[in-house]
Amino acid sequence: MNNDINIRPMTENDRDEVLGMMRVFYDSPAVIHTSPDSVLEQDFRDCVGELPYLRGFIAEHDGDVAGYAMTSVSYTTEYGGICVWLEDLYIKPEFRRFGIGTEVLRHIEKEFPEAVRFKMEVEQENEAAYACYFGEGYRLSDYGLMTKERP
């Protein structure tokens, strides 16, 4: 790991910082669907609470909060094991191109040694994210993603 980069669990003390980053992330072109503050607040509560399916991580650079990530866990019958979804990965603009995203990906893989698959959604125009993810072995899936939301 890069000595000036630290990845740690998200805590309640990160609330304001994380909610601010989430608002920027969910209002950006990197996300197709924006979410209301109430959803972002629920996501944060679940990350730092007792919900076993969602975990949050804080990326720091030289002691400053540089970004965050959230993961959720499911089971993949296709691969016969745990699948980790990278739900959110956001690095503040002033901290991009320092290798922080790469370190977050590597950290998450170490945090879930039992996982047989890692998945994420990526907005196609996000070329920098694609380059980072491809560099870490991620590939585009041939499957189409279908969703249905409840009102």
Image: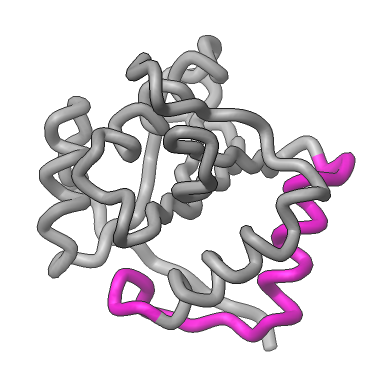
- Residue 112: where, in percent of width, then height? 55, 19
Q: Is 49 colored magenta in this rendering?
A: yes
Residue in front for this viewpoint, 43 or 19? 19
Task: Answer whether residue 33 is visible to the viewer in this image.
Answer: yes
The residue under the point 71% across, 65% down is 16
Q: Exactly how many numbered labels are in the figure?
A: 0
Span of residues in magenta = 28-51
Colour mode?
one colour
Percent from the top left, x then y, of residue 99? 25, 34
Q: Is 56 on the left or on the right of 63, as rendered?
A: right
Quadrant containing the C terminus is bottom right
> Residue lying farthest right?
50
Which residue in the rendered view is the most extreme toward the top? 113
Q: Residue at x 11, y 44 (%)?
A: 131
- The quadrant of the picture occupied by the N terminus is top left
* Residue 149 in which image quadrant: bottom right
Task: Name the residue: 42% across, 28% down.
Answer: 5
Query: Which residue does the image show at 86% across and 45% down from the upper left?
Result: 49
Horizontal relation, residue 115 to residue 141: left or right: right
Taking the magenta stretch, the answer to whether it contains residue 85 is no
Residue at the front extreme of this rendering: 62
- The image quarter containing residue 38 is bottom right
Residue 136 x %, y %: 21, 27
Tell me which corner region of the image, top left, top right, bottom left or bottom right, holds residue 114: top right
Q: Is residue 79 visible?
A: no
